[in-house]
Amino acid sequence: MKSYDVCQCGAPLELREQGTPQPTGTEVLLRVIAAGVCHRDLHFWEGVYDLGGGKKLKLTDRGMSLPLTMGHETVGQVVALGPDARGVAIGDRRLAYPWIGCGTCKVCQRGDEQLCLKPRFLGVFRPGGYSDHILVPHPRYLFDVGDIPPEQAAPLACSGVTAYGALRKLGGLVQSEPIVIIGAGGVGLMSLCILKSLGGRGAIVVEIDEAKREAALRAGAIAAIDVNAPDAVRQITEAAGGTVWGVVDFVGSGSTVKLAVDCLTKGGKLIVVGLFGGEITVPTPYIPIKAMTLQGSYTGSLSELKELIDLVRRAPLPYIPVRRRPLAEATAALTDLKEGKVIGRTVLAPFL
């Protein structure tokens, strides 16, 4: 089995060859067809989160160990089954849900494995899809994506379910009001597509990169506004019809969260998804005076991925731009993503 692994944080991924794992118990072995390159991978590659004020959170302190095979957006073909695996067969093509918890705590039992305090995430705490094979612990984490092309299906496991989970937290605002989406990367563009399928009123996109603003307009955004415009708050508010009720921040920097707070009307909701880093200072009286909701959203649950796939199969989403690259170009793909050169999504194909 060949994989490209993080052996030193921030350094080029290294090719490692080892024996292909054999599934035991309920495990399922997939031959990787497509593995998405996600902005979240940049944090795993670099090994830190920026907490602002010069503070860093090292991921090795949270249980991540090296070498690490990244890749949490994976479509593969079933090639071997453990003796207790049921519900899939050799040859099936499946999307793997990566946000796997311990399975026994109260959080997992209520269906929020992505929030488990003892996670077993694929591509983070277990080997992921930057490989020619991936081992999934149970068939319950595998989804039939039907005729969805693998390179479009793979991002649903993170980009898609992250956008869907965030939009769901806005509740009825999605259908009743135009919302503001900060960031037009892969997740931001995916959210525009999902918003259409949910019958949303539309979205105003706020993005620093001109090419990504243009991509957002092509994807159906009501307006695309430069986050650095001196009158950005005024432009956003006018484009929303005079009142901003809901914002989803897929960047998550100190400046973007502040911008979102400044835009919100009384009773508005801000969902922070992005992990760019930094810190904010919000005067505490603003919280009750504006009666605003500030909520975080971390990926999405197993049931939300099922709902999303059902939604996509009933009403196919407009495809976001995707570039397929060989697995050997994993480091180059990460570098391009870090430098802001990617429009939409990059997907690694081990057998390209």
Image (cartoon, rainbow, N blue to C red):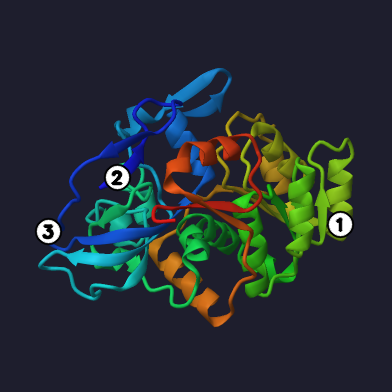
Q: Kindly tell me whether residue 244 is visible in this rendering.
A: yes
Q: Quadrant of residue 198?
A: bottom right
Residue 226: % across, % down: 82, 43
Q: Is residue 343 left or right of residue 202?
A: left
Count of marks placed on residues:
3
Q: Is residue 185 above or below residue 52?
A: below
Q: Quadrant of the C terminus?
A: bottom left
Q: Secondary structure at mark 2?
A: strand
**Disc number placed over residue 321 in the picture, else none:** none
Query: What's the residue type where badge 3 is placed?
Result: Thr
Give the foreground label among 2 and 1.
Answer: 2
Q: Nearer the viewer, residue 28 or 267?
A: 28
Mark 3 residue crowding within 10 angstroms, few (<14) / some (14–19) / many (20+): some
Q: Secondary structure at mark 1?
A: helix
**N-terminal label among 2 and 1:** 2
Q: Is residue 209 left or right of residue 338?
A: right
Q: Furthest residue to the bottom?
A: 314
Whole-number angstrom distance, CA of label 2 to CA of label 3: 20 Å
Mark 1 residue crowding within 10 angstroms, few (<14) / some (14–19) / many (20+): many
| Residue linked to disc 3 | 24
| Residue linked to disc 1 | 239
Whole-number angstrom distance, CA of label 2 to CA of label 1: 50 Å
Query: What's the residue type where badge 1 is placed?
Result: Ala
| Residue linked to disc 2 | 2
Residue that appears at 61% across and 71% down: 317
Q: Furthest residue to the front?
A: 352
Residue 8: % across, % down: 37, 25
Q: Quadrant of residue 83?
A: bottom left
Query: What's the residue type where badge 2 is placed?
Result: Lys
- Contact, mark 2 vs mark 3 (Cβ under 8 Å): no
